[in-house]
DNA sequence: GCATCGATCGGCT
DNA sequence: GCCGATCGATGCC
């Protein structure tokens, strides 16, 4: 992974991050994800960017060189992270919104509070007793003894899909919080690293960024089409007045 | 100072 | 689909 790739215009950098791998190592172990969904934020030209109104203590990392990690805290409980892009001094960044866990699956599951396959009925033919729910009236076993119905529908076919589906989940799966802010992702011994990975050859899908009030019309979200780990689109919703 | 609301998520209806 | 949680950055008086 070369820093010069990240130093270009953020709208060119963002799609290039698709298919790249972010790997994080803590005392608990290593988790790596292949990035499947990102959003571009173009600093002073972009009302949706945290850097739109100039540099603050929170946003100072974005004003530094490309390839560093900008982590921020939001909604009183979540962390989200960006890869700083563009040349030194230009505060553009790419929000990492989702990925597929490709290493450290068990650790990622534990951090996200997902049961391991051994602990649950996921993907097993015989559900444990606690997962069995009462059938609604009218539901009967088929002649083969298989009950279609709420139980089968409530258990997702692939729970691992959700491990890093969404920017805050991605941070949890990788064990990244405040202390990740400012880390140089291209440094040789950094605890969090951006690696070339398999890359992505196809044409990314694009659309408006998720949950923004301002500049909601700019199609600066990029994702790998048909990838199940991409998060669902949500428009901005104004809060209700008391 | 104080009020507002967010680059969200999980639980519940 | 709707709602509440929870805190820090920002903006207005």
Image (tube, coloured by chain):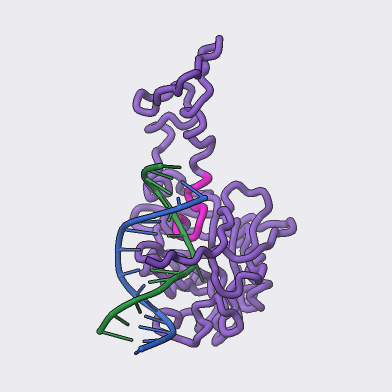
Chain colours: A purple, B green, C blue
Looking at the rendered image, the quarter that the C terminus of chain A falls into is bottom left
Give the answer, above or below, for where A131 lies relative to A66.
Answer: above
Give the answer, above or below, for where A231 lies relative to A194.
Answer: above
Query: Taking the image as drawn, is residue A120 in sight?
Result: yes
Image-based side of A181 in relation to A225, left or right: left
Q: Residue at x 74, y 56 (%)?
A: A202
Percent across and percent down for residue A190 are: 44, 68
Query: In the image, which residues are magenta?
Result: A161-169
Q: Residue at x 67, y 68 (%)?
A: A219
Q: Residue at x 46, y 86 (%)?
A: A55
Q: Which of the 4 quarters of the picture holds residue A168?
A: bottom left
Q: Residue furthest top?
A: A143
In the image, residue A21 lies in the stretch drawn in magenta: no
Looking at the rendered image, the quarter that the N terminus of chain A falls into is bottom right
Q: Residue furthest front?
A: A242
Viewer-side residue, A138 vs A25: A138
Q: Residue at x 51, y 25 (%)?
A: A149
Viewer-side residue, A11 vs A146: A146
Percent across and percent down for residue A174 are: 44, 57
Percent across and percent down for residue A127 are: 42, 24
Give the answer, above or below, for where A156 lies relative to A186.
Answer: above
Viewer-side residue, C6 vs A87: C6
Percent across and percent down for residue A137 are: 46, 20
Query: Taking the image as drawn, is residue A24 in sight?
Result: no
In the image, residue A165 lies in the stretch drawn in magenta: yes
State the count of labels: 0
């Amino acid at each position: 992974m070369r820093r010069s790739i990240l130093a270009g215009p953020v709208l060119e950098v963002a799609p290039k991050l698709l298919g790249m791998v972010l790997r994080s190592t803590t005392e608990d172990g290593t988790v790596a994800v292949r990035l499947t969904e990102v959003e571009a934020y173009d600093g002073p030209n972009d009302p949706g960017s945290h850097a739109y109104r100039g540099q603050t203590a929170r946003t100072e990392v974005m004003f530094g060189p490309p390839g560093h990690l900008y982590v921020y805290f939001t909604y009183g409980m979540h962390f989200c992270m960006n890869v700083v892009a563009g040349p030194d001094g230009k505060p553009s960044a790419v929000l990492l919104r989702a990925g597929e866990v490709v290493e450290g699956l068990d650790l990622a599951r534990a951090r996200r509070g997902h049961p391991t396959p051994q602990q649950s009925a996921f993907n097993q033919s015989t559900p444990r007793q606690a997962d069995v729910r009462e059938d609604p009236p009218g539901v009967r076993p088929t002649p083969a003894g298989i009950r279609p119905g709420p139980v089968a529908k409530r258990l997702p076919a692939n729970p691992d899909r959700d491990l890093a589906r969404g920017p805050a989940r991605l941070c949890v799966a990788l064990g990244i919080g405040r202390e990740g802010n400012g880390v140089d992702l291209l440094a040789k011994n950094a605890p969090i690293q951006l690696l070339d990975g398999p890359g992505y050859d196809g044409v990314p899908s694009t659309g408006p960024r998720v949950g923004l009030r301002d500049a909601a019309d700019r199609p600066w979200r990029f994702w790998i089409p048909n990838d199940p780990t991409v998060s669902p689109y949500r428009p901005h919703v104004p809060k209700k007045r008391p």
